[in-house]
Amino acid sequence: MTQIRTIFFCCAMLLFMASAQGQNLKINNIFDKYGKQKGSTMVILSGEAVKNYQLSLYRSITLRYEEPQSVDLQECLNADKQQARKIKEVISNGIIRSGYYQLLDEGKNMNRYILFKIGNDQQATLIYMEGDPKSEELINKLFVRE
Amino acid sequence: MKDVNELIDKYFRGETTREEEKQLRKYFTEETPTGDLAEIAPIFTYFSEEESVTEFLKELRVEKTVVKRNISKRIPFLKIASMAACLLLGVLLLNKIVSIDRMSSENCVWVNGEKITSIAMVRKYAETSFENVKSEENMLEQQLRLMGE
């Protein structure tokens, strides 16, 4: 009986950890993998620096849109947009050229956004932002022309 | 032999001590009696066999307790091992969360693998990335243009 209880406890812990890990977005891999590489520019801003924009976190990465990062970028965006509640994107030949994704807030009273664009100079920019619900209006004004 | 006969008489009178009965059992197990003694031999060999069976059962009981003890030792070990594994996973997860938090609480820009913490520079690069993503044309126009290309 004790053994069953212990096994049950362990399974519950593992499930909890797996679900906690699942909250991570795939695009985090892009920041982790390419952020500190030569040819990339990664910006991390948080706290007071972005408070005026109703944001709590701003992360961006600009890198050359070529393999293998192009493949990773498309894969991660396609995976993360499954969690989005608002999607605006431009797709050409099956490739996401630019995208705006507002993600589900998971009950944290927080808005999360992913922005992506491949520029004419073949530089891709990926932005991830977190902010309070008021940030939506501002983000729309700043990034999305209706 | 005389002693054995005396002991047997004593035994049937019910006057033998435990030690004497033991001697009798030993005698009948080790020797091959003849005549009258052979007839009563099964009484003592039976007891001798019974004793060995009892001893065997006793050993079995001891073994069972040893097995039980081993199991009871294994369960706490399993419990401790699983708790340790959970703790380790928890620590790793916390570590990851803390490192993400630490990363996000620090304002910086990485340019070609070099870290810059000057807030003015960080803002400048942030604005540039803002501009990169900002669309000059709306998404519908952009999609139509790409379709025409």
Image: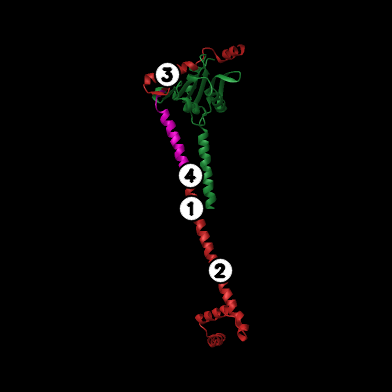
Label 3, label 4: how far apart the Cα atoms are: 43 Å
Are discs 2 and 3 both within one chain? Answer: yes
Q: Residue at x 50, y 28 (%)?
A: A29
The chain letter for the residue carrying disc 2 is B
**Main secondary structure found in the magenta portion:** helix
Q: Earlier in the sequence, mark 2 or mark 4?
A: 2
Amino acid residing under circle 3:
Tyr
Counting residues from the N terminus, which is met first, the one under dot 4 or under dot 1?
1
The span from disc 2 to disc 1 (Cα, nearest Å) is 31 Å
Q: CA distance from mark 2 to mark 4?
A: 43 Å
Amino acid tagged 1 = Pro
The type of residue carrying mark 2 is Phe
Which mark is on residue B76?
1
Q: Which residue is mark 2?
A: B56
- At label 3, counting other C-alpha atoms closer than 10 Å, the crowd grade (few under 14, some 14-19, many 20 or more) is many
The picture quadrant where one finds residue A88 is top right
Q: Chain of mark 1?
A: B
- The mark nearer the N terminus, 1 or 3, is 1
Please state which of residues A2 and B22 is positioned toward the viewer in this rendering.
B22
Circle 3 sits on which residue?
A: B125
Circle 4 residue: B85
